[in-house]
Image: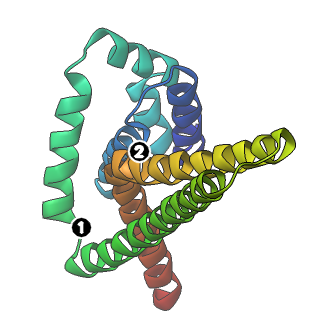
Amino acid sequence: MDKRTFLRNLREELKRKKIKDIETVIYYYDELIQDALENFENEEDFINKLGDPSQIVQQFKSDEKFIDRIKEVNLNSIRGLVGTSVQIISSIIHIFIIFVISVTGGSIVVAGGGIIIQSLAYLITESRSIPEILAITGVLMVGSGLVLLGINMVKVVIDLSNNLKLKIIRKTKDYLKKKEGYENE
């Protein structure tokens, strides 16, 4: 099995078992395999030594601290191995994505809040017929849904921020390696 297939199978198994820190685990194994390849180890042999992705995921289930150890290794790896340019580029992309999604989520919250306030003001100002009250209640529910959607968007961005950063770092490194490889040819 090659690296790409192994990582894809591992990702699918992690999703299937509902492991939270998927990108942390993928980054760890990607770096582990890359280090082995840089030390001239055979890719298939090394991946076979790692074991089947389902066995690896079982290890996470049985050893709760394993993910914490992987996070520490990843952090050290990022500090020590990733070049400054990759860190800068990935940080800019990371901040931009968080900013855009947070602003979008905030805008949705404000829009939903505006709908709620306007609908309540419309209800309070005059007496309304039952169909009008039902229609305004529907609009209030839409406004409430928008507020909840916006809040959830911001919450998800905050929750997934670290995984997003690891994924951006991996993709940036892969892109720069490919670019270097093409320039060297």
Q: In the rendering, which numbered label is found on residue 82?
A: 1
Quadrant for residue 172, please give it.
bottom left
The vertical placement of 7 against 58, above or below, is below
- Identify the residue position indicated by label 2 in the image: 23
Front one among 164 and 33 = 164
Quadrant for residue 50, please give it.
top left
Front one among 99 and 125 = 125
Point out residue 94 in the picture as x, y percentages from the top left corner.
Answer: 37, 68
Left or right of 1? Residue 71 is left
Task: Mark 2: give few (<14), some (14-19) or many (20+) Cα within 10 Å.
Answer: many
The vertical placement of 17 against 161, above or below, is above
Residue type at tag 2: Glu
Please tell me which residue is depicted at 42% across the width and 56% down the height of the picture. 167
Residue 79 visible, this angle: yes
**Quarter of the image where the N terminus is located:** top right
Residue 37 visible, this angle: no
Front one among 168 and 131 = 131
Point out residue 38 in the picture as x, y percentages from the top left corner.
Answer: 32, 58
In primary-sequence order, the first of circles 2 and 1 is 2
**Outermost top residue:** 62
Left or right of 170? Residue 114 is right
Secondary structure beneath disc 1? loop
**Outermost front residue:** 127
- Mark whose residue sits in front, 2 or 1: 2
Residue type at tag 1: Val
Please tell me which residue is depicted at 61% across the width and 52% down the height of the picture. 143
- Marks 2 and 1, how far apart at CA: 16 Å
Task: Mark 1: give few (<14), some (14-19) or many (20+) Cα within 10 Å.
Answer: some
What coloring was used for the rendering? rainbow
Quadrant for residue 62, please give it.
top left
Please tell me which residue is depicted at 34% across the width and 72% down the height of the picture. 95
**Outermost right residue:** 131
